[in-house]
Image (spheres, helix red, strand yellow):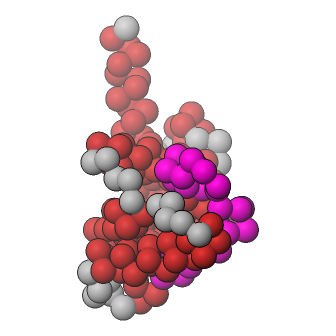
Amino acid sequence: MKGTVIMDKRSVKTQTKTEKALFELMQHDNFSDISITNIANQAGISRMAFYRNYSSKEDILNKFIQKEYDQFISDISQHSLDKLEQLLEVYFGYFRDNPQVLSAIVNAAIEGLALEKQSKYLNDFFRLKIRDEQPSQYEIAYYSGAIFSSLLYWRKTDYKRPAKKFADQLAKKIRKDLQEKNGETII
């Protein structure tokens, strides 16, 4: 058992170093130009250690995004966030508080991957919070694109607008659209 605990701690340390290395590289390199060797060298680990923890550089991103999403869901559950405004405020607040994450996404040219993941999570939110008529996948893509584009614009303005005000405005537009569709308030 003791050997497993030591190995788990070492694995977590390696994963943390690997994530950090990838995001450091993504600050100035396109994701497609970053190699496993670049990541391993930046992290100070061997390629063997890399492959013990990840199958590819995409695997790092997927696990990182999943870990952040799990934390996000935990925060939402812990604070009983039921309104879209609240969800968006927490979401925008995360990127305001962690600007290096969005910078890395933009600099590495992986906005498409980030948008795809965000759309999945937005779909999950609607599924959990709206029990009646769900927005279509087309509508989810539309709302998600609007949210992500707004996030990118907010980044360009150096996050000057308060997250709450930004979240309230976007949620109001989405709610209005859903009300027009359904004739009632659903979120």
The residue furthest top is 1
Please state which of residues 66 and 105 is positioned toward the viewer in this rendering: 66
Q: Is residue 54 above or below residue 143?
A: above
Q: Residue at x 58, y 41 (%)?
A: 54
Give me the residue at 38% from left, 13% from top.
Answer: 3
How many numbered tags mark residues here?
0
- Report the side of 161 relative to 32 (left or right): left
Q: Nearer the viewer, residue 33 or 81?
A: 81
Measuring from the top left, give residue 14's x and y in whole percent: 42, 41
In this picture, is 88 found above or below 121? below
Q: Nearer the viewer, residue 57 or 144?
A: 144
Across and down, in percent, residue 186 comes to 51, 60
Check the image and report above or below for 1 versus 94. above
Q: Which residues are magenta?
A: 123-150
Q: Please state the horizontal and vertical placement of residue 9, each as a whole percent of the image.
A: 35, 29
Residue 25: x and y in percent read 48, 67
The verdict on residue 92 being magenta is no
Q: Quadrant of the N terminus?
A: top left
